[in-house]
Amino acid sequence: MAALFRGSRTVLFSWNKHVDSAFVCTRTMASKTPVGFIGLGNMGSPMAKNLLKNGYPVICTDVFPESCKELQDIGAQVVDTPADVADKADRIITMLPSSPNVIDAYTGNSGILKKVKKGTLLIDSSTIDPYVSKDMAVTAEKMGAVFMDAPVSGGVGAASMAKLTFMVGGPEEEYTAAQELLTCMGANVVYCGQVGSGQAAKICNNMLLAIGMIGTAETMNLGIRLGLDPKLLAQVLNMSSGRCWSSDTYNPVPGVMEGVPSANNYQGGFGTTLMAKDLGFAQSTATSTRSPIPLGSLAHQIFRVMCSRGYANKDFSSVFQFLREEEGQ
């Protein structure tokens, strides 16, 4: 057994991964020592801000340096690479667009694992292939670090208000240490099982979200064509059995709700490309598990077509606009 002391944080860990569970890695509740944050996009930036609001010093980086300026202006320390973050922090959160981005951030020439300290807690909140999460966990373990997957649900609005839902996969004995940080950024933190299970839960959630958004867009379009006022129709849906998140919180019709992408020409939010990516994960895992997902597969194709028709960088709720244009309106 070995013990490391970093500030007020004590980490006990065994070099033998097959030791009795009584000696598995444990952590004290960490005090507010620095937290690394890598990936300051639409979701990562408000998440990092909420860590700062909760008194955690943040050390951050992004492949686009201009993304760091706002965090720097409110007190975050900006460094050049993920390796530099790992050199200065032993708790690191990553929020990146795709599996290749995560692999590079962790294992690239300037990646986290080039300078990671033994005992470092690594939390990846990206939505990626569960198998990539498992590979990263194995690689991190070889370096004496602990990797957990903790993808999020809730969108940019929830990220800004610290009301995200985190789906966490990883060693159960590390959950409390991860939860301490995640509760600064979210209202719900759910332990789902071993590494990869958080990603599995997120993939299932996003498949349902995509199907629900297409259904809401179709329904709203039909009602409008039948002469119904869209705000009235949304009100009826939201007090009836058809109510869902896409209708009552993230309505895809311009003018129905304020503060959502449809009120801003579908800018911001969760990009169509990212939804197509997540549906691709659902498709591949459904194939490997021999699970029929006819609606999930159709949703995947719809969002892929949208990407080829100029909607790639628009919020995924722009499926309403896409359907209207397909009708020649």
Image (spheres, rainbow, N blue to C red):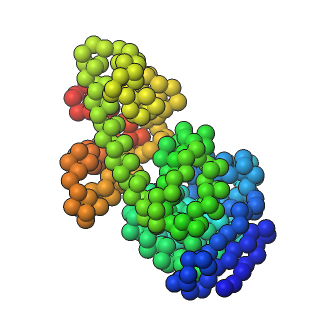
Give the quarter of the image for residue 37: bottom right
Q: At x 60% / y 54%, what residue is drawn?
A: 182
Residue 19 image-quadrant placement: bottom right
Residue drawn at x 53%, y 68% as measured from the top left:
171
| Image x and y of residue 207, in percent | 33, 48
**Residue at the extreme right of the image, as rendered:** 7
In the image, taking residue 306 as reference, residue 90 lies left or right, namely right
Residue 260 versus residue 163 in the image, above or below: above
- Image spot of residue 49 (x, y percent): 66, 48
- Image quadrant containing the C terminus: top left
- The N terminus lies in quadrant: bottom right
Inspect this view and state whether residue 100 appears: no
Depth check: give the residue in front, 207 or 226. 207
Rendered residue at 25%/63% (across/down): 289
Q: Looking at the image, how many numbered discs can be counted on the residues?
A: 0
Q: In the picture, residue 80 is in which quadrant?
A: bottom right
- Relative to 59, say whether 118 is above or below: below
Q: Position of residue 297 (x, y in %)?
A: 23, 50
Q: Is residue 101 left or right of residue 121?
A: left
Please tell me which residue lies in front, 114 or 56: 56
> Which residue sits at x=47%, y=25%?
257
Is residue 231 or residue 179 the one in the foreground? 179
Q: Is residue 269 visible?
A: yes
On the image, the x and y values in percent for residue 291 come to 23, 57
Residue 125 horizontal side relative to residue 12, left or right: left
